[in-house]
Amino acid sequence: MGRLRVLAINPGSTSTKIALFDEEEMVFDKNVSHDAEVLKTYASVQDQIDYRKQTITDALQAEGIDLAAIDIFVGRGGGLVNVAGGTYLVTERLLVDARKGMAGQHPAQLGSQICDLFVREYGGVAYIVNPPDVDEYDEIARISGLSDVYRQSHLHALNQKEIALRYCAEQGLAYHETNLIVCHIGGGISVAAHRAGRMVDGNDIIRGEGPMTPTRAGSIATIDVVKLCFSGAWTETELKDRLTKNGGFIDHLGTSDAREVERRIQEGDAYAALVFDAMLYQIAKYAASMAAVLKGEVAAIILTGGITNNPSVVRSLTDTLGWIAPIVAMPGEFEMEALAAGALRVARGEEEALIYTGESVWKGFAKA
């Protein structure tokens, strides 16, 4: 087998990240921007697929990249029912649900479909890796205080898993035998307990659990949310947006840019410092709760995501969490590398490709 060339595709709200790998080496990457006015002309995310594929094709051809020479197309995935973690072969069953957007319309659902279109046109094979629909929660973690409301896993599965795997590889540990707490700290924040290769608990970033973030309000007392709902000041859509898109730093400080907040702090803005510290305080509380989930048996607490490039963030969380386990900073995001790595593990026979069945890994509680 010659050296494998892998194209990773990661669709976002207004752009699509693409990266070409020669084995593990990234030889090209680009964030392909999509015209916001053009996107508005489409009734749904699903309707954007041909437009997005063409912009990706144009960007690759402009670089002289031969799509027919690519062996593997790997996408972010999304739009599926809840699944176990791993690398999935793109099949018609998977594509049917991705087109529907089983978890709601989101650009991630286009990843598998664009890969499939490229395979049909140029050959190769298509996979997705640890899509946002990964759900490995323990049964006990799903129970809430209401019988008809249960907790679900929605977090940064792709980067969470990749960081955990990288740390274990560096330390000579087996991920499936190791307990870790991973804190992804960026525009979104997810904190998860990894027990022996499974993310058994964490905060649901889609439904509003967890620390506040630059754009999300995070967990708020339910009665306060009920009051907001019935205040008459907000429509349902407006309030959802306030909680999940315009909360956190935006609501307090009018910006979602953590670097702008850091600049204000350096210039003596005491309230900006208080809000930033409150976010770190909340992250530490959630991370400590994951230590309880793991019964104190934690090999390391790993800090990742863009905001962990700030040394003061690492120092603060080391100060509050260092008594639990060693704190390891692995700044940035490795989503594109994670996509390529997952596909390569399957191609090399290190893992078996999973087959999407369309059946959720969790089907509800067995009640007497």
Image (cartoon, helix red, strand yellow):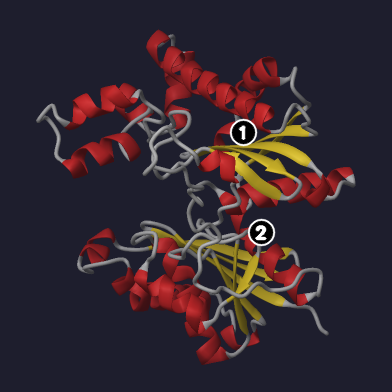
Q: Secondary structure at mark 1?
A: helix
- For label 2, the crowd category at 10 Å Cα-Cα, with few meaning under 14, some 14 to 19 and many 20 or more, is some
Percent position of residue 267, x then y: 44, 13
Rounded to the nearest whole Å, what is the CA distance between mark 1 and mark 2?
18 Å
Q: Secondary structure at mark 2?
A: helix
Please state if 149 lies on the left or on the right of 308 as rendered. Answer: left
Q: Amino acid at mark 2?
A: Glu
- Identified at 23% across, 28% down, the residue is 226
Residue 26 in sight: no
The label number, if any, that marks residue 337 in the structure image:
2
Q: Quadrant of the N terminus?
A: bottom right
Please state if 251 lies on the left or on the right of 168 as rendered. Answer: left
Q: Quadrant of residue 158?
A: bottom right
Judged by depth in the image, the label closer to the viewer, 1 or 2, is 2
Residue 243 in sight: yes
Please state if 231 lies on the left or on the right of 205 as rendered. Answer: left
Q: Relative to the observer, which residue lies in front, 192 or 260?
A: 192
View extreme (front): residue: 368
- For label 1, the crowd category at 10 Å Cα-Cα, with few meaning under 14, some 14 to 19 and many 20 or more, is some
In the rendered image, which residue does mark 1 sit on? 309
Q: Amino acid at mark 1?
A: Asn
